[in-house]
Amino acid sequence: MEKAFLQVRTDKSDKEQASDILENMGTNLSSVVNMLLKQIQASMDMENMTLTENDLHLLKTYQEQPMLKR
């Protein structure tokens, strides 16, 4: 299987805390992200879901919204 590079922007402290937690659990961020991607694909397949053009537009609109501060 051909591998692709995925770059994600996140809060530094969130990344560090998650990395520590996952390391204590015997895994890492890369493995968990890969599991998430496979779960998304499996869920879409199981529910026989497809994204319409409108769905994609809504996702893009949501993505462009400023993130809420904690």
Image (cartoon, rainbow, N blue to C red):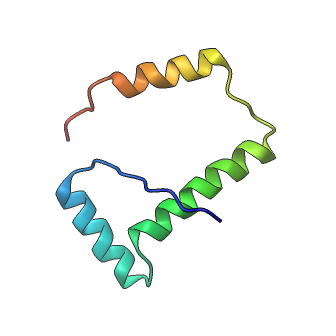
Q: Quadrant of residue 19?
A: bottom left
Residue drawn at point x = 50 percent, y = 25 percent: 59
x then y, percent, for residue 16: 23, 67
**Quarter-wise, where is residue 49 in the image?**
top right
Q: In the displayed structure, does residue 41 sit left or right of residue 33? A: right
Q: Position of residue 61 (x, y in %)?
A: 43, 19
- Reply above or below: 9 against 16: above
Q: Residue at x 70, y 48 (%)?
A: 43
Name the residue: 28% across, 47% down. Answer: 9
Q: Give the quadrant of the C terminus.
A: top left
Q: Is residue 10 left or right of residue 53?
A: left
Residue 51: % across, % down: 67, 27
Q: Nearer the viewer, residue 39 or 4?
A: 4
Quadrant of image for the N terminus: bottom right
Q: Is residue 5 above or below residue 29?
A: above
Q: Residue at x 32, y 23 (%)?
A: 65
Q: Position of residue 44 (x, y in %)?
A: 72, 42
Nearer-the-camera pick, 66 or 57: 57
Vertical order, 63 against 44 (above or below): above
Instruction: Name the residue furthest front.
Output: 2
Tag count: 0
Q: Is residue 66 above or below residue 7?
A: above
Q: Is residue 70 left or right of residue 46?
A: left
